[in-house]
Amino acid sequence: METVIIIVFVLGYLAITLEHNLKIDKLIPALIMMAICWALIAFGLDDFTTWFDSSQHGLVDGYAEMGQEGKLHLMEETLLHHLGKTAEILVFLLGAMTIVEIIDYFNGFATIKGFIKTKSKVRILWIFSFLAFILSAIIDNLTATIVLISILQKIVGKREDRLWYAGLIIIAANAGGAWSPIGDVTTTMLWIGNKVSTGNLIIYLLLPSLVCMVIPSLIASFLPAFKGKIDADDLDDNNENTSKFGPTMLYLGLSAIVFVPVFKVVTHLPPYVGMMLSLGVVATFAEIYSSTKFSITELGAKEESKEAAHHSPVHHSLSKIELPSILFFLGILMAVAALESLGQLFGFANYLQDAMPMLGTELDGTRVSDLVVIFLGFGSAVIDNVPLVAASLGMFSEPIDNPLWHFIAYSAGTGGSMLIIGSAAGVVAMGMEKIDFFWYLRKISWLALLGFLAGAVVFVVMRAIL
């Protein structure tokens, strides 16, 4: 039965990877894979000889001798445990996405466009690279990419030039998301899973991530694509900030998101609690500024709800949330949890450690090869990094802030830049600018590879020093 479950998982994983070829949204195979894996576990419960208790990070003693009722109860408890951990991530993401959409409702991101006055292609490159690096650490790399490419389309008229800028934005956004606990889904998973703390994550990854961004941007500065200036006709000077509250909501929303890690450190409560507090505060100001008397708690008749959604910035923002992404995360995280419960991920981790040279992180008397983690980075360029990090959570049981977790956060977060389909930022940029996969492979991938390897070297050196 374990073999069948692994086959189902591999087939589902393959369907997710070939999403664009199959023309099937990746949330569909993720949900089907999750449901079938757990159904097979339920059917073959009596055949399994081991069971992994995630809450205790160890195998359950005497599992083979348990009766059917005891095994069923244990499976239900395990399923509920994983659902709770997954829900923490999903609720956190829902709050962050809603705040970003509220900012966009007031056209707050138009404020950023006002900072860009130069026409030099190189200067614009560095402005967008640093904006992507900083913004992605605050509002996540996916949203930062959407915002910056939207601004880019209003500043650079020639599509050929925009493609190059978009490629470097992807690299910078992924690098910026790696050193922040709220900058990327994978780092958020490690943070909520108590594998990394905010302070140490920044200390260990800020410099490697910065190098990962700077090296490609520096090399690109000497390429012909960034020589000269953009045409004067390409520069759009129209003021699109139609709301006087736009700048206020931008600063309020970003401050509210940055407040979440502070709230966690002070209260020791899960991050989603702080995110809900931040959402409540931002939503309050949004309702006041929108000059509507509608209360977000009043959900009456269907027509009233439609009217409310039209006038309420909160309802408008909630209607724009990408629920397919949320459902995809639910499916993939719960599917990986199924493999973890059977102890499969730990067996794979042991195989990797035996197969790779033992030159790397010290872990309780053994050493995990740095090549294993770098391999994870290359893997995230081919397949989604969310299940890879979810798998690593089940593969290793090291304590919080072990260097292994920081290296995993870096590799999974930045490695996806090497292919345009390797990260959420790359996929959304691909859709917004119709970037060809092979164009990106020829023009941008080698820059991303150099940045990834340079940052990895910096991390290894810092780990030896700190």
Image (tube, rainbow, N blue to C red):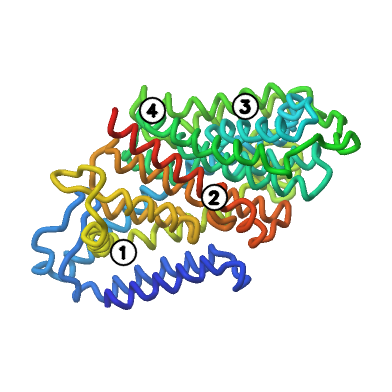
Gap in angstroms between the C-alphas marked 2 and 1: 27 Å
Residues at badges 2 and 1 in contact (C-beta under 8 Å)?
no
First in sequence, mark 1 or 3: give its number: 3
- The residue singled out by tag 2 in the image is 417
- The residue singled out by tag 3 in the image is 284
Q: Residues within 10 Å of mark 1 (few under 14, many from 20)?
A: many
Q: Amino acid at mark 2?
A: Ser
Disc number for residue 203? 4
Residues at badges 1 and 3 in contact (C-beta under 8 Å)?
no
Depth-wise, is mark 3 or mark 4 nearer the camera? 4
Q: Amino acid at mark 1?
A: Leu
Gap in angstroms between the C-alphas marked 3 and 4: 34 Å
Would you say residue 341 is visible in this rendering?
no
Residue at image point 81% right, 34% down: 229
First in sequence, mark 1 or 4: give its number: 4
First in sequence, mark 2 or 1: give its number: 1
Q: Secondary structure at mark 4?
A: helix
Residue at image point 17% right, 66% down: 50
Depth-wise, is mark 1 or mark 3 nearer the camera? 1
- The residue singled out by tag 1 in the image is 339
Q: Secondary structure at mark 3?
A: helix
